[in-house]
Image: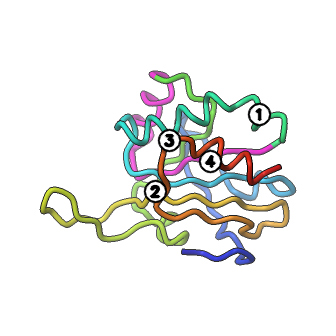
Amino acid sequence: MLEIGDDAPDFTLKNQDGDDVSLADYAGKHVVVYFYPRADTPGCTTEACGFRDAWDAYEERDVAVLAISDDPVSDLKKFEEKYDLPIELLSDEDGAVARAYDSYGEKNMFGKTFDGVFRNTYIVGPEGTIVEAYEKVSPEGHADELLSALT
């Protein structure tokens, strides 16, 4: 897990529309960078819809939200449309960005071992450093938890 004060690794990924989005695009503002395992699954939907429901408060604080999974762009587009998500959904199919953020690795589920994305969140400050870090996030209420940290 990256630590508070670490430089946030820069990245450029495709969003749900196939456009390039870079962390550097948001220099000078707070950015929530959150990692989630799979679009349109119960926990990930709860988490994403939490950001959607709190979106006005994020906009009022001028905070960007970048959600990263290893889903392909086409799956992200369906997820966005199904739940009317206002956040940037970014495709990290090879897990390289998630690895740079210590949010990708070996997982075990139903007796099977595989590599996947860990549900971690970082708040990147205006100077490009990690100002908050959350490991093994609980999706319910997470967007509101972050708003409290951003006040």
First to last magenta residue range: 63-82
Residue visible at 75% across and 38% down in the picture: 58
- Foreground label between 3 and 2: 3
Dot label at residue 39: none
Q: Residues within 10 Å of mark 2 (few under 14, many from 20)?
A: many
Q: Earlier in the sequence, mark 4 or mark 3?
A: 4
Residue annotated with mark 2 = 119
Residue annotated with mark 1 = 57
- Taking 151 as reference, is 49 above or below it? above
Q: Earlier in the sequence, mark 3 or mark 2?
A: 2
Q: Label 3 sits on what residue type?
A: Glu
Q: Is residue 82 left or right of residue 60?
A: left
Report the coloring of the rendering. Answer: rainbow
Residue annotated with mark 4 = 66
Residue visible at 45% across and 51% down in the picture: 36
Q: Position of residue 142 (x, y in %)?
A: 57, 46
Dot label at residue 140: 3
**Where is the N terminus found, in terms of image quarters?**
bottom right
Q: Quadrant of residue 133?
A: bottom right
In space, the residues marked 3 and 2 are separated at their CA atoms by 12 Å
